[in-house]
Amino acid sequence: KYLQENELSQECKEVISSLPVEQGWVASHLCQYQGFWHSTRQMQGVLACQKHFQAHDTDIILVTTPKSGTTWLKALTFALLNRNKYQDLQTHPLLTSSPHVLVPFLELDLYLDKEENPLPDFTSFPSPRLFSTHLPYVSLPKSMKESTCKLVYLCRDPKDTFVSLWHFTNRLRLKNMGTNSLEDSFEKFCRGVSLYGPFWDHVLGYWKQNLENPEKIMFLRYEELKADPALVLKELASFIGSPFSKEEEANGLVDDILKLCSFDNLSNLEVNKNGKLLSGEENRAFFRRGEVGDWKNYLTLEMIEQLNAIVKEKLEVHGLKF
Ligand code: A3P
């Protein structure tokens, strides 16, 4: 069952009533919790996940800013982790299930889309468990920070992230709501008012943690994945503790996984063309162009300068360039 905004728990409503609220661009409202903007509906999942999720030392958590390539990272990591279980790529689960079903979001799926019982049943998750989240570092459940579980963080150039998010929100909006204007959405994004925004604070939180503890947090960018996916996949395999053997590499397994998870392959599968998630989102909304630099086709010179200036002020001072 998909939880509706008017079905939130009393506890959640009370928390929200004390938070700053803004009109959103996908969801009708966003509220600012622990410094980051969430749709009021997802707040229930955020609070439940923070309160109840118990990380295992062996867990692998994929953390991303929305529209940074989450779907791709989910597919790659799922294929990587299960490469012995699903050796026959002709019958691989990724051919018939969305990556978002195979690697659920903690706060958006497991702790949210629930019937009466708000707590998920984890018994069917084999070890090492693979989950995902968009939560900022400050809002992660305590056990995730304290256990030795691994976090793989993925972000993307904010200009492409914005353009991708703008398209995505317009795809998800109900027809009678009309489309979000690029200008209004941009103004909100620059003020930090976007799903899990401010974008820069999200990225910075994980960037700093990665510098302090690179064994626990891997920091990736969509652009490096696009530039050399084989290299990143091998690094990812080593990071999660299951590096490719010489034999696997010689057998072409790295390329096989990349092909299986490629934009062209995934986006042309029946499940990703016509399937829907439990939340009602169409799977195809997660596959648009999959290119670096599409912002050039949408942003004005003024917008580019404005966003570049924010990145310079907020991120470059910390050694993080896009
Ligand atoms: P664009 O809108 O720029 O095309 P997320 O998965 O975090 O929601 O991000 C979606 C973005 O990743 C979209 O970017 C989408 O096209 C791109 N994407 C999805 N699957 C991909 C894949 N297998 N390879 C490369 N990019 C992919």
Image (cartoon, rainbow, N blue to C red):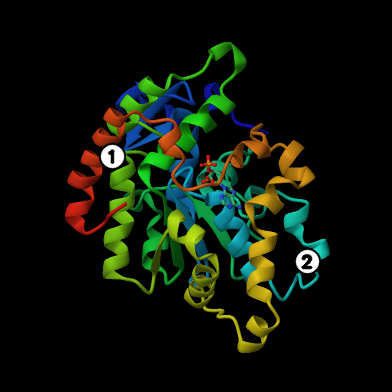
Q: Give the mark toward the camera: 2 or 1.
A: 2
Q: Residue at x 44, y 55 (%)?
A: 223
Splitting the image into 4 quarters, where does residue 19 fall?
A: top left
**x then y, percent, for residue 178:** 53, 14
Q: Residue at x 48, y 52 (%)?
A: 52
Residue placed most toward the observer, 199 or 112: 199
Q: Which mark is residue 89?
A: 2
Callout 1: SS: loop
Callout 2: SS: helix
Which amino acid, mark 2?
Answer: Leu
**x then y, percent, for residue 220:** 42, 61
Residue 102, placed above or below residue 46: below
Q: Is residue 200 left or right of residue 98?
A: left
**x then y, percent, for residue 119:** 58, 47
Dot placed on the residue nearer the N-terminal end, 2 or 1:
1
In space, the residues marked 2 and 1 are separated at their CA atoms by 43 Å
Instruction: Characterize the local packing of mark 2: few (<14), some (14-19) or many (20 or more) Cα atoms within 10 angstroms.
Output: some
Q: Residue at x 71, y 82 (%)?
A: 251
**Residue 124 in sight here:** no
Residue 229, placed above or below residue 174: below
Residue 219, placed above or below residue 97: below
Q: Which mark is residue 285?
A: none
Return the residue at label 1.
35
Splitting the image into 4 quarters, where does residue 40 fall?
A: top left
Which amino acid, mark 1?
Answer: Gly
